[in-house]
Image (cartoon, grey):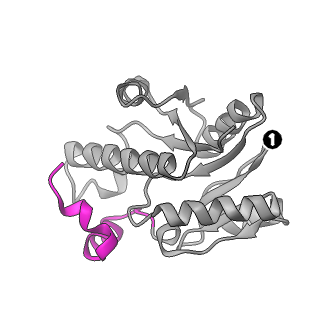
Amino acid sequence: MPTVAILPVKSFRLGKARMADDLSPDSRSDLGRRLTERTAALAEEAEMLPVLVAGDAEVAEWALGLGLPSIPDPGEGLSEAAAAGTRWAAVSGSWWLVLHTDLPLLTREDLNELSGAMARSGWVIAPSADGGTSALGGHGEATFSYGPGSFHIHLGRFPDAEIVSRLGLLHDVDSFADLTSARRHRRGLWLNEPP
């Protein structure tokens, strides 16, 4: 069984609200779709099975149009969305990787490194530059604590996890400044292309 790449995806209409002063609702929605589609494609290239935890029916329908499986988000925040994904993966005994979709500089090599770390250590965790958690992988059901400082919280919860720190996992997009810097990096030039 391939590793299940669990991709929690908020409603495209409501996502990236912190960029509301800089991007229109349609632009934010389009950005969310493009980031998610790219992340799912990279997961498939890395021989993972991407599964969206869909924040609403629109996301689920969009995923279906791309041939991607989805499960409903329980609607209780990111931690519960991630846990729902792990429960789904646990039914088949699959390894899983909770992976955020707001990683515009992510590469297949980053995902291969995460897979290798899981194979070596059983658990893997990748920090974002602001102290959050960009990726966390393992097996069985798990409890998550996403939010400020989540990397250290998760590291305490999964003390045997191998830490993977790579550019594509460090640079997430939480603000317009994050998006601007990603667009200026050679790996993020795809963001400047028309949708």
Q: Residue at the location (23% across, 58% down)? A: 21
Percent position of residue 144, x then y: 71, 50
Percent position of residue 188, x then y: 31, 68
Quick one: 37 or 149, which is closer to the camera? Answer: 37
**Whether residue 94 is situated above or below residue 100 in the rendered picture:** above
Residue 99 lies left or right of residue 90; in this view the side is: left
In the picture of the structure, the residue carrying the numbered disc 1 is 140
Res 61 → quadrant:
top left
The residue range painted magenta reads: 172-195
Quick one: 97 or 170, which is closer to the camera? Answer: 97
Residue 133 is at least partly visible in this image: no
Q: Residue at the location (37% across, 44% down)? A: 37
Residue 166 lies left or right of residue 28; in this view the side is: right
Percent position of residue 122, x then y: 81, 57
Name the image quarter holding the N terminus: top right
Q: Residue 191: say if magenta.
A: yes
Quick one: 194 or 21, which is closer to the camera? Answer: 194
